[in-house]
Image: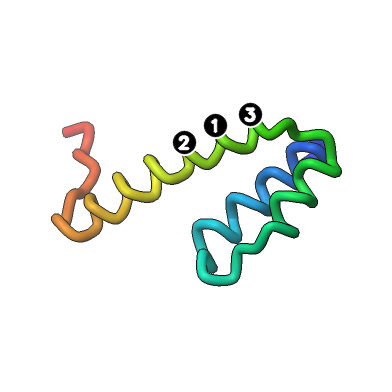
């Protein structure tokens, strides 16, 4: 998708935070900052991502499924 490098860097940071949290380092946040993301934007993105990750994991654990339109 045609997205800005700034957004691409933020999404890469959040992807690593979600899929490989034990590998996340300060350099990953630095890459997002170097692409133009502010510390406040990074913080907010972390909060949103963490909330979605928690909700998703709880839903998976509890066996929640989407309802059919029927």
Circle 2 crowding by C-alpha within 10 Å: few under 14, some 14–19, many from 20: few
Q: Are marks 1 and 3 in contact (CB under 8 Å)?
A: yes
Mark 3 or mark 2: name the one nearer the start of the chain: 3
Read off the residue under disc 1.
Answer: 44
SS state under label 2: helix
Which quadrant does the N terminus fall into? Answer: top right
Who is closer to the viewer here, 29 or 59? Answer: 29
Circle 1 crowding by C-alpha within 10 Å: few under 14, some 14–19, many from 20: few
Read off the residue under disc 3.
Answer: 40
Which quadrant does the C terminus fall into? Answer: top left
Who is closer to the viewer here, 25 or 54? Answer: 25
Circle 1 or circle 2, nearest the eye: 1
Residue at the location (63% across, 37% down)?
42
In the picture shown, does residue 27 fall above or below 34?
below
Residue at the location (54% across, 31% down)?
44
Q: Quadrant of residue 60?
A: bottom left
Q: Are marks 1 and 2 in contact (CB under 8 Å)?
A: yes
User: Which labelled disc corresponds to residue 48?
Assistant: 2
């Amino acid at each position: 998708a045609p997205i800005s490098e700034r957004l691409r860097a933020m999404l890469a940071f959040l992807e690593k935070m979600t899929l490989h949290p034990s590998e996340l380092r300060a350099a990953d946040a630095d890459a997002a900052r170097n692409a133009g993301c502010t510390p406040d934007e990074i913080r907010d993105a972390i909060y949103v991502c963490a909330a979605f990750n928690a909700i998703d994991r709880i839903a998976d654990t509890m066996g929640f499924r989407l309802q059919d339109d029927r």
